[in-house]
Image (cartoon, grey):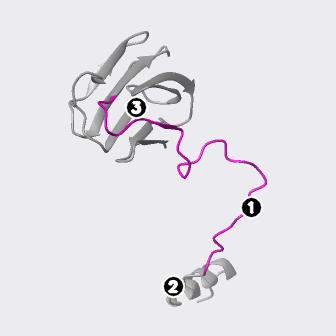
């Protein structure tokens, strides 16, 4: 029985043990990353209460929630808004993890984050996409804000 060359190579490759090759920690991609999870995009005072305002500036409904501290999902219609926490009470202990995603398929979402005092305002828009996207925002215990 003769195997085509590609099939023989595939069979041979599956018999070899897996190897992990070292990857350089610094890689050049020929473009600049505009926003990185390694750099904080803002800062709140960790000793004061934090409030998160979410505005849906797109034409598609979105769902958002806090995964830490846990909260119920909130559906925000186009043009709508919702608020987590208050600047008057310590309702939201740090760290805070926020998640937002579209309610429909093939909708990507974009975000603009504004920080004024201890109010974090997230304006969410939509964009046509092959796959649905989501937004994750984290506020660390030191008050640093990161967007993923």
Indicate the position of residue 144 as horizontal and vertical percent values: 45, 43
Q: Magenta part of the protein: which range?
A: 22-50
Does the magenta portion include 27? yes
Q: Mark 3 and 1 residues: CB-CB less than 8 Å, in contact?
A: no
Q: Secondary structure at mark 1?
A: loop
The residue where tag 1 is placed is 28
Q: Mark 1 and 2 residues: CB-CB less than 8 Å, in contact?
A: no
The residue where tag 3 is placed is 101
Q: Residues within 10 Å of mark 2 (few under 14, many from 20)?
A: few
| Numbered mark located on residue 18 in the image | 2
* Above-or-below relation of 12 to 82: below
Q: Residues within 10 Å of mark 3 (few under 14, many from 20)?
A: many
Quote the CA–CA distance across marks 3 and 2: 37 Å
Q: Residue furthest right?
A: 30
Quote the CA–CA distance across marks 1 and 2: 26 Å
Q: Going 42% across and 12% down the picture, which residue do you hit?
A: 78
Q: Residues within 10 Å of mark 1 (few under 14, many from 20)?
A: few
* Above-or-below relation of 142 to 133: below
Q: Mark 3 and 2 residues: CB-CB less than 8 Å, in contact?
A: no
Q: Is residue 118 visible?
A: yes
Does the magenta portion include 67? no
Upstream in sequence: badge 3 or badge 1: 1
Indicate the position of residue 141 as horizontal and vertical percent values: 34, 47
Upstream in sequence: badge 1 or badge 2: 2
Q: Secondary structure at mark 2?
A: loop
Q: Going 57% across and 26% down the picture, which residue do you hit?
A: 128
Q: Going 25% across and 29% down the picture, which residue do you hit?
A: 73
Mark 3 against mark 2, which lies toward the viewer? 3
Which quadrant is home to the N terminus? bottom right
| Numbered mark located on residue 142 in the image | none
The rendered magenta stretch, by its main secondary structure, is classed as loop
């Amino acid at each position: 029985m003769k195997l085509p060359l590609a099939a023989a190579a595939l069979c041979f490759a599956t018999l070899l043990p897996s190897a992990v090759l070292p990857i350089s920690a610094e890689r050049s991609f020929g473009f600049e990353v505009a926003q990185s999870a390694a750099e904080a995009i803002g800062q709140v005072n960790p000793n004061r209460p934090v409030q998160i305002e979410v505005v849906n500036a797109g034409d598609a409904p979105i769902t958002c929630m806090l995964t830490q501290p846990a909260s119920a999902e909130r559906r925000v219609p186009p043009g709508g808004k919702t608020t987590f926490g208050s600047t008057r009470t310590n309702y939201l202990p740090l760290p805070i993890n926020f998640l937002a995603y579209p309610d429909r398929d093939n909708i990507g979402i974009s975000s603009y984050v504004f920080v004024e005092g201890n109010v974090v305002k997230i304006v969410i828009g939509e964009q046509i996409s092959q796959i649905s996207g989501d937004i994750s925002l984290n506020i660390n215990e030191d008050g640093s804000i990161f967007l993923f």
